Amino acid sequence: MSPSIPLDEAQIARLIDRFYDKVSADPLLGAVFNPVVHDWLAHKRLLTSFWCSVVLRAGTYRGNPMAMHRGHAIGSQHFARWLQLWGETSREMLDAEAADLMIEFAGRIGHGLQLGLGIQPQPARSSPFAIPVVSAAARD
């Protein structure tokens, strides 16, 4: 484990395993992914390779995430739920520093995928009445 990266491959593999167990059981996300993921164990290995390449710069992932998500009925609500579950699972499985790192990476990846797929990301902060939240500092 690198001193600058508070994670190793085994931790990432455990995170991926737990997270995608939640995804497959989630009513919103499972409805999209269960019909197209025919082998969850193989998919988890692929995603462990992806995340190790992202976080640890392992260079083991060979694939095109954008192309793999194209053509599926995915909207901003799916990305919001994915990020929510990812954050919860990261905080359950990792120490605070590692969880923060994984959540930051996931946010950037999710944002990039949404843009690439032509999906308008949900606003990070909004009221239940769709009135933008503006702090007093922003108005000054």
Image (cartoon, rainbow, N blue to C red):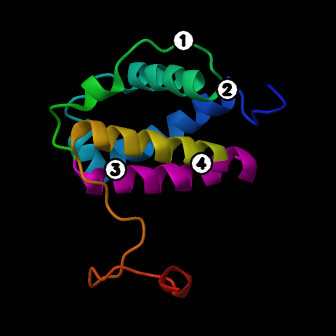
Q: Quadrant of residue 76?
A: bottom left
As drawn, the label of residue 60 is 1
Q: Is residue 13 visible?
A: yes
Cα separation, mark 1 vs mark 2, equals: 15 Å
Please report whichever mark, 1 or 3, sits nearer to the chain's N-terminal start. Answer: 1
Residue 8 horizontal/vertical position (percent): 71, 27
Question: Mark 3 against mark 4, which lies toward the viewer?
Answer: 3
Q: Which residue is mark 2?
A: 10
Report if the CB atoms under discs 2 and 4 are less than 8 Å apart. no
Question: Mark 1 against mark 2, which lies toward the viewer?
Answer: 1
Cα separation, mark 1 vs mark 3, equals: 25 Å
Q: Amino acid at mark 4?
A: Ser
Magenta part of the chain: 75-100
Instruction: Say if the magenta span includes residue 59.
Output: no
Please report whichever mark, 1 or 2, sits nearer to the chain's N-terminal start. Answer: 2
Report if the CB atoms under discs 3 and 4 are less than 8 Å apart. no
Cα separation, mark 2 vs mark 3, equals: 25 Å
